[in-house]
Image: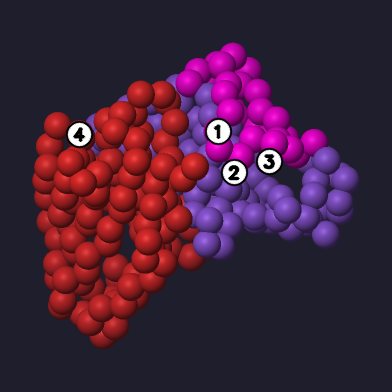
Amino acid sequence: DQQVKQNSPSLSVQEGRISILNCDYTNSMFDYFLWYKKYPAEGPTFLISISSIKDKNEDGRFTVFLNKSAKHLSLHIVPSQPGDSAVYFCGFQGGSEKLVFGKGTKLTVNP
Amino acid sequence: NAGVTQTPKFQVLKTGQSMTLQCAQDMNHEYMSWYRQDPGMGLRLIHYSVGAGITDQGEVPNGYNVSRSTTEDFPLRLLSAAPSQTSVYFCASSSSVVGGSGNTIYFGEGSWLTVV
């Protein structure tokens, strides 16, 4: 059974606007929530994370929100830039040593 | 990249052949893992290790074997390749099993495997 769901396989936004990427999860034992970014032909790279004791973490243009009651994680990118065009994976870890990822959302930022 | 090296980068195999994907890290990380990425399926965990001599199965372990004889190396073995194993494989490592800003997980650049 899939523990992590990224229901939007793709998202297209205009440069300068906000990009919002979403994840839903089912396992309430997750301790850490992470976002990774992946360009074609490269390995994923760490973007931002949040622990289960927080509901918001901000790093420059990137903000991650955690709603534990709804089991929902989101990533906001403001303002979006063409260089942000990539596939974004949400990842979850906790309890065991496993880090599981969603299926990814392909973000395209149009100039 | 941050010190995770995968080889080979590209490989074509015939059905039934065996091969090993190599992964090495020079960061003295305890935690290493293998993922495969398929279109529409995201990153799926194959096997992982929390230290030398310790391995465990992930979400999709069938058809793969791993061992961890040293901290630095975590090879992934395909025992008898099948077309369903055509994928991009990523090795990852981190200093702890706990994710978060202090324990970033680093990925290699990927190994593209085609089984014909």
Give the quarter of the image for residue A76: bottom left
Q: Could you say where residue B110 lies in the image, as x and y percent from the top left?
A: 56, 51
Residue under pointer 3: B21
Residue under pointer 2: B6
Q: Residues within 10 Å of mark 4 (few under 14, many from 20)?
A: some
Q: Amino acid at mark 3?
A: Leu
Q: Do discs 4 and 3 belong to a common subunit?
A: no
Q: Nearer the viewer, residue B98 or A21?
A: A21
Residue interval drawn in magenta: B50-79
> Which of the two discs, 3 and 2, sits closer to the camera?
3
* Mark pair 3, 1: CA separation: 17 Å
What hue does chain B carry in this figure?
purple
Give the quarter of the image for residue A18: bottom left
* Mark pair 3, 2: CA separation: 7 Å
Q: Amino acid at mark 1?
A: Gly
Specify whether B16 is left or right of B96: right
Q: Could you say where residue B8 lies in the image, as x and y percent from the top left?
A: 68, 48
Residue under pointer 4: A52
